[in-house]
Image: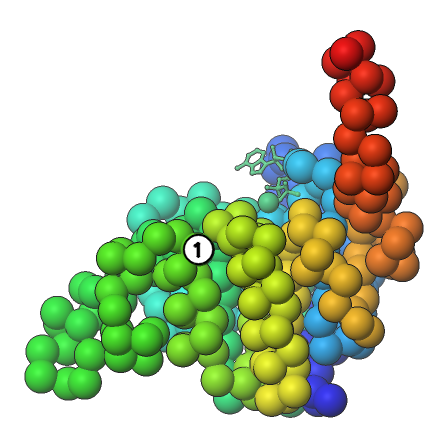
Amino acid sequence: MSVGYLSEIVFENQIPEGSYLQSLPVVRYLRDHTCLAFDADVTFLVGENGTGKSTLLEAIAVACGFNPEGGSRNFHFSTNATHSELHACLRTVKRAYPKDGYFLRAESLYNVATNIEELDRERGCLPPLTESYGGKSLHRQSHGESFLALVQNRLGGQGLYLFDEPEAALSPMRQLTLLSEIDRLVKAGSQLIIATHSPMLMAYPGACIYELSDAGIAKVAYKDTEHYRMTKQFLDDPERMMKYLLDF
Ligand SMILES: Nc1ncnc2c1ncn2[C@@H]1O[C@H](COP(=O)(O)OP(=O)(O)O)[C@@H](O)[C@H]1O
Ligand SMILES: [Mg+2]
């Protein structure tokens, strides 16, 4: 449905000597395989904590021109410059230029909200930016509410959207709401790349799931992901799992 704005990333430059990136399996995989394709409307990056999902997503975001801390391509604030130099090693191959775009990371939504308020104060009599986020300050809503307000009001389609663990603030019901928002954006010609641990989100039909591990990056089917298998095993028989885990 979407034209797919980002078609692949190509690993081109050397990682600086001594950087922790040298030993990250996902980076070694990119160096050895040179490129990673993004052929689906929705691509999920899944895998254990510490496998490099955020590092990869952030590098893609910065290479695509987004602020490393989040926001649209117009955001330039920085509260704590901790992003890696991986973006400088990547070339992005695009099929088209998106009309809209947003990089959203759960842990920096607070800073995005602060920046929107600051911009509104600076802009004076211009229409407040807060209006395009639903009209209510993102700071005056819960984490989950402000996240969904941003997605529902600000993201209009024909865009490239990058989310890092968007489920962090969301109840299971709101994760279903986010799934229907993802579908709305796809049907409006968008491409999404989402790092997630949510077995609900990664069920989105037709998505490409890249699993990151010590072995690098592998494309996996939904029901073969560790997240699906582990969650299913648990919910099928929580008592058995407790007995095994805690010797109850
Ligand atoms: N600034 C840094 N210096 C050293 N190691 C880092 C730095 N940032 C991240 N790492 C390490 O890189 C690995 C990947 O981190 P991250 O991309 O956040 O993983 P994920 O998002 O998959 O949980 C982790 O082992 C983390 O400790
Ligand atoms: Mg992460």
Q: Residue furthest left?
A: 125
Residue name at image x 48 percent, y 84 percent: 156
Residue assigned mark 1: 144
Residue name at image x 45 percent, y 65 percent: 148
Q: Is residue 95 above or below residue 49?
A: below
Q: Position of residue 15 (x, y in %)?
A: 66, 47
Residue name at image x 70 percent, y 56 percent: 200
Viewer-closest of 211 and 188: 188
Would residue 50 be found to the left or right of residue 230 on screen? Answer: left
Quadrant of the image occupied by residue 16: top right
Visible residue check, residue 144: yes
Q: Position of residue 124 (x, y in %)?
A: 9, 78
Q: Quadrant of the N terminus?
A: bottom right
Viewer-closest of 111 and 93: 111
Would residue 34 be found to the left or right of residue 61 on screen? Answer: right
Amino acid beneath label 1:
Gly
Viewer-closest of 143 and 78: 143
Q: Is residue 190 above or below residue 216?
A: below
Q: Position of residue 146 (x, y in %)?
A: 37, 61
Quadrant of the image occupied by residue 222: bottom right
Would residue 9 be found to the left or right of residue 72 on screen? Answer: right
Residue name at image x 25 percent, y 69 percent: 136
Q: Quadrant of the C terminus?
A: top right
Q: Position of residue 203 (x, y in %)?
A: 77, 62
Visible residue check, residue 216: no
Q: Quadrant of ligand 2?
A: top right
